[in-house]
């Protein structure tokens, strides 16, 4: 029996090595997830670590929990005003694009492998989604960005196409285990899962913002725990009621991010850290689960699947999905086609056939693992080169160091003093309830002649004086909130891009 001290020491060492390897990934130009996987593989039974782990159910359970918080954090980091113009394109790529990719790869696998059609389609469905974290870690490490709407489009597609891949995988497993089931029954199931996932996601996101602002906890450290519970409730209720829980948590994060709520900045940082912890734990576990010696026999098949995926399925599906959008250049379409990196989701999905007892499940898992590694190493290493060749790169902006609250601001006016007039809409409200635009900062609140630093839970009173720094447009919106209604010339509602 392993002593708890030894277990904790082993976990700590693996986490430390993973954190250190993230720094090395910047120098090597490969995503950190590859190194996380490598550490797990080296620590496994085929490596010098000698840790034997062969429990797909535990790996899948951990992966599901990790995906919940990774997707929520991804939604929380997404800005609605950037996503809104490319929403239709992203939605088409994350649904139709995934289906087309799976169909093309599935047919290729069927004619080459000794698989039935459903088994080949299952393999293809598992590797049909893309990974945003891998893409942008490469771009940031090379200090480049992408022109136009490419970055938000890739971000939206990668964050929202996992639910489709999950649906296809689970549906195909159901068809394999129940041959008498008609594929047509999947259509209403898909509509129900996506519709309920979208509705519950937006609803729970709005509820989160309202609840966080109203509960007024005595200890700031409890707010992260509150959001964790709300995220898990969102996933659990949505899944139990027949919706897609993963889509729900992503949209909940996206909706919450575009509302004002207490401790917003610190909570976003917390969930970013939590997402990193989930990624490290997930990739280490998946690295332990795979046996590197079993990857060599499937190398030839894996390379063939990679070729079809990179040079046929992904380009064809992207070009077809973006055909109606003539404003996009051919270079942009080619870039989107190439940025189709595979990440953690395919490996997690590859454990589903293992648990279900599907024939060829072991081979599917090993092929998927090989494809993910190859995709990240080949495509991930060449993204900067392809962006330069296509003329789509631009320098990554490095803004000057300013106070955290003032980051990401475009333009600023001088500090302005705004009195809170009696009878104004702001009286009796928390600052978080004012829905203040992102480019506005309340630096100081003076009450009865005494300065104080306001927080999101600070309730404004008549006679308060706010020292504010903001852009001219947002300043007028805030002024309308602090003046009497009859004196206000601007609408009291801020245009901060809240979801409808």
Image (spheres, rainbow, N blue to C red):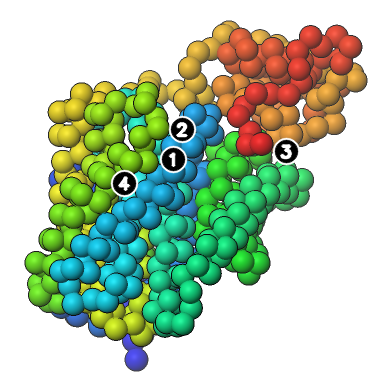
Residue that carries the numbered disc 3 in the rendered image: 457
Residue 22 locus on image (x, y percent): 26, 50
Q: For the residues marked 2 and 4, what is the alpha-carbon distance in whole angstroms? A: 17 Å
**Which quadrant is the C terminus positioned in?**
top right
Q: For the residues marked 2 and 1, what is the alpha-carbon distance in whole angstroms? A: 6 Å
Cβ atoms under marks 4 and 3 closer than 8 Å? no
- Disc nearer the start of the sequence (1/3): 1
Q: For the residues marked 3 and 2, what is the alpha-carbon distance in whole angstroms? A: 34 Å
Q: Which residue is drawn at 21% across and 72% down?
A: 366
Cβ atoms under marks 1 and 3 closer than 8 Å? no
- Disc nearer the start of the sequence (1/4): 1
Residue that carries the numbered disc 1 in the rendered image: 90
Residue that carries the numbered disc 4 in the rendered image: 317
Select label 2 or label 4 by which is in front: 4
Q: Which of 268 and 189 is in front in this view?
A: 189
Residue 303 locus on image (x, y percent): 12, 61
Q: For the residues marked 1 and 3, what is the alpha-carbon distance in whole angstroms? A: 36 Å
Q: Nearer the viewer, residue 394 or 352?
A: 352
Cβ atoms under marks 2 and 1 closer than 8 Å? yes
| Secondary structure of residue under mark 1 | helix
Residue 423 locus on image (x, y percent): 90, 20
**Which quadrant is the N terminus positioned in?**
bottom left
The image's mark for residue 86 is 2
- Disc nearer the start of the sequence (2/4): 2
Residue 446 in sight in this render: no
Select label 1 or label 3 by which is in front: 1
In the image, 251: left or right of 126? Answer: right
Image quarter for residue 265? Answer: top right
Q: For the residues marked 4 and 3, what is the alpha-carbon distance in whole angstroms? A: 48 Å
């Amino acid at each position: 029996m392993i002593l708890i001290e030894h277990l904790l020491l082993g976990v700590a060492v693996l986490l430390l090595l993973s954190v250190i390897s993230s720094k090395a990934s910047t120098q090597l130009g490969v995503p950190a997830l590859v190194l996380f996987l490598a550490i797990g593989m080296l620590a496994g039974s085929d490596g010098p670590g000698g840790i034997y782990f062969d429990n797909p159910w535990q790996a899948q359970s951990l992966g599901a929990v990790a995906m919940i918080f990774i997707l929520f954090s991804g939604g929380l980091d997404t800005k609605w005003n950037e996503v809104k113009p490319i929403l239709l394109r992203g939605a088409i790529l994350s649904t139709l694009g995934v289906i087309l990719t799976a169909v093309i790869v599935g047919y290729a696998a069927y004619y080459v492998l000794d698989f039935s059609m459903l088994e080949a389609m299952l393999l293809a469905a598992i590797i049909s989604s893309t990974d945003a974290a891998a893409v942008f870690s490469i771009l940031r490490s090379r200090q480049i960005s992408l022109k136009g709407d490419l970055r938000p489009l890739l971000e939206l597609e990668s964050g929202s196409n996992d639910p489709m891949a999950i649906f296809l995988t689970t549906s195909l497993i159901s068809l394999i285990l129940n041959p008498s089931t008609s594929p047509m029954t999947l259509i209403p199931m898909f509509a129900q899962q996506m519709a309920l996932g979208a509705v519950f996601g937006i609803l729970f996101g709005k509820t989160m913002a309202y609840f966080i602002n109203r509960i007024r906890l005595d200890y700031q450290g409890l707010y992260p725990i509150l959001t964790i519970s709300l995220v898990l409730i969102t996933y659990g209720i949505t899944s139990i009621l027949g919706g897609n829980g993963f889509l729900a948590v992503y949209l909940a994060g996206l909706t919450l991010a575009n509302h004002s709520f207490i401790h917003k900045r610190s909570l976003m940082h917390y969930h970013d850290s939590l997402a990193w912890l989930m990624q490290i734990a997930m990739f280490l576990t998946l690295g332990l689960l795979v046996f590197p010696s079993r990857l060599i026999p499937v190398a030839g098949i894996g390379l063939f699947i990679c070729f079809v995926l990179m040079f046929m399925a992904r380009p064809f599906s992207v070009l077809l999905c973006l055909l109606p959008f003539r404003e996009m250049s051919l270079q942009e379409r080619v870039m989107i086609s190439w940025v189709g990196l595979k990440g953690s989701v395919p490996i997690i999905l590859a454990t589903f056939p293992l648990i279900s007892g599907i024939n060829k499940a072991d081979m599917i898992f090993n092929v998927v693992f090989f494809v993910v590694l190859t995709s990240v190493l080949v495509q991930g290493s060449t993204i900067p080169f392809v962006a330069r060749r296509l003329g789509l790169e631009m320098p990554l902006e490095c803004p000057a160091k300013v106070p955290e609250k003032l980051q990401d601001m475009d333009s600023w006016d001088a500090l302005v003093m705004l009195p809170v007039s009696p009878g104004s809409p702001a009286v009796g409200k928390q600052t978080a309830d004012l829905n203040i635009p992102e480019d506005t900062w309340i630096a100081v609140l003076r009450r009865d002649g005494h300065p104080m630093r306001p927080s999101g839970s600070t309730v404004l009173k008549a006679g308060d004086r706010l020292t504010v720094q903001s852009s001219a447009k947002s300043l007028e919106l805030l002024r309308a909130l602090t003046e009497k209604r009859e004196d206000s010339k601007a609408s009291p509602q801020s245009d901060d891009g809240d979801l409808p």
